[in-house]
Amino acid sequence: MARKISNRRRVIMTVIAWALAFVIFFPILWTIILSFKTEGNAIKAPWDVLTSAWTFDSYHVVQERSNYFRHFMNSVVISFGSTLLALVIAIPSAWAMAFVPGKRTKDVLMWMLSTKMMPAVGVLVPIYLMFRDWGLLDTRTGLVIVLCLMNLPIVIWMLFTYFKEIPKDILEAARMDGATLGGEILYVLTPMAVPGIASTLLLNVILAWNEAFWTLNLTAAKAAPLTAFIAAYSSPEGLFYAKLSAASTLAIAPILILGWFSQKQLVRGLTFGAVK
Amino acid sequence: MSTQASRSAARLMISPSVILLFLWMAVPLGMTIWFSFQRYNLLMPGQGGFVGWDNYYYFLTDPAFFTALINTLVLVGGVLLITVFGGILLALLLDQPIFGQGIVRVLVIAPFFVMPTVSALVWKNMLYNPVNGIFAYLAKAIGLQPYDFLAHAPMLSITIIVAWQWLPFATLILLTALQSLDSEQLEAAEMDGAGALSRFFYIMLPHLARAATVVILIQTIFLLSTFAEILVTTNGGPGNASTTLTYLVYVQSLLQFDVGGGAAGGVVAVILANIVAIFLMRMIGKNLEA
């Protein structure tokens, strides 16, 4: 084909794409830049900000003043705890539905999905009151339970679509070769299921990490994860741009990195297999 | 292979998740419906009892409800408009051979992984702020007055923030759909003399329609629950200019302690969400057959 034309076109497209990508990424980039500035410099005009001195001060201040690390650990415990708990409950279910499908398997799957359609605000009042009466308000345990149940349908669905792709013939082949049931599960099925389980874990940790309805409504100070901790910056005192930027950068960095690895799973997981 | 034994084993394996999800859905929803017919205010513990449809009557006739309904529609509609059109354009662009495609993709997708409270505060302070925000500096640089976005156009400002968060999602799904398009079909059309535009309108767009529908439905479900972005930027204000249905229920139940009224609002929100959910479920169900 006409090679010259396609090269010119490629350069033009590259320029447009990079310009748009820069605009879209800019708020994040700017936050990262401001986090390395002093408070005084962070509110200067953009061109003056760029030429001012770089510093790690804000990161120190954020940790010292607000015990950032505790909120970070709350986020880790809540997102991983809720996802792992959901996996423990979901793996047997997804497994059974993928390998021993019954007449009503499809209905059960659709019903599970429908629970995800319920807006959280519809059950805010009873959950809040129950948590108050059971002493679960502002506890990590409470949030682990709520986020686990909230993401359970997605976890089951993702696992189901992965498990369904494992060829069933391979089980029979292993059995013919004299594998026991334990051996079957350990040596044949587990290695084939691990990638699917890992993807499910990844996407749901991300969803739980960023969840900002229940985490804001059910925590105060003790169990507040990063979502709620950052929200406290909405009523600031004095200069705070650099500190807000440092806290934000720390809060989004781990998930940004995990997220970039999970692009493919994201489409699959969040569309419930409707787009692959 | 599915013997009687394996059937009952399967049932046993499925039952924990079924029971948990049933409890998670039925118990709180049942309580919400129950509360919605009660006079129940946390500040007045003595007063209570059945009040029939009163809570619904007060919630639905409250002028704030109408505002909230309009705001919810503006938010959901605005975000859908921006993300679907923007997403199609970005997906077409990312599908082209460009230099550094991987990096561009990573940069475009990034906003989706930023937690809602962070993105809302970053936009509020670093971009929208009429004194120190980037937009204010840009306006001054070209000789305009800085504009206080969140005070004068709160719904538009919040819509832009939320659209920024969801644009990557739409782009990613539409791009995935675009890449599954049979390239032979496009080449054949090109051979037959179809221009770029007609190839787009007659081959790509129909192919994208399904993915776009999925984007619209899933985003609608999530957008109806938009909460953190409003809480940290405007608190629903000024007045109730940026109060959505979700936010209104939150205010009524957790700030005004009117459990009955809040519950009635919650039921209304559930009904609205279910109307969308029915369409989404149908699409996914069809896919499961295939």
Image: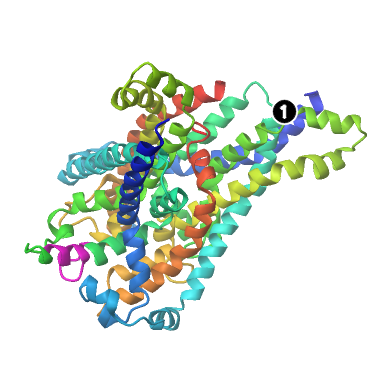
Left/right placement of residue B124 relative to residue A137 reads: left
Q: Residue at x 77, y 24 (%)?
A: B2
What are the residue bounds of the magenta stretch?
A: B128-139
Residue A65 sits in quarter: bottom left
> Residue drawn at (34%, 40%), measured in percent from left and top?
A9
Along the line of sight, which residue is nearer the eye, B193 or B225? B193
In the foreground, A228 or B112? B112
Residue type marked 1: Val
As helix, strand or loop, the secondary structure at mark 1 comes to loop
Where residue B108 appears, as percent x and y from the top left, is 39, 50
B58 sits to left or right of A225: left
Mark 1 Cα within 10 Å, few/some/many (few <14, many 20+)? some
In the picture of the structure, the residue carrying the numbered disc 1 is A100
The image quarter in which residue B172 lies: top left
- The verdict on residue B134 being magenta is yes
Q: Position of residue B69 (x, y in %)?
A: 22, 40
Image point (60%, 37%), residue name: B18
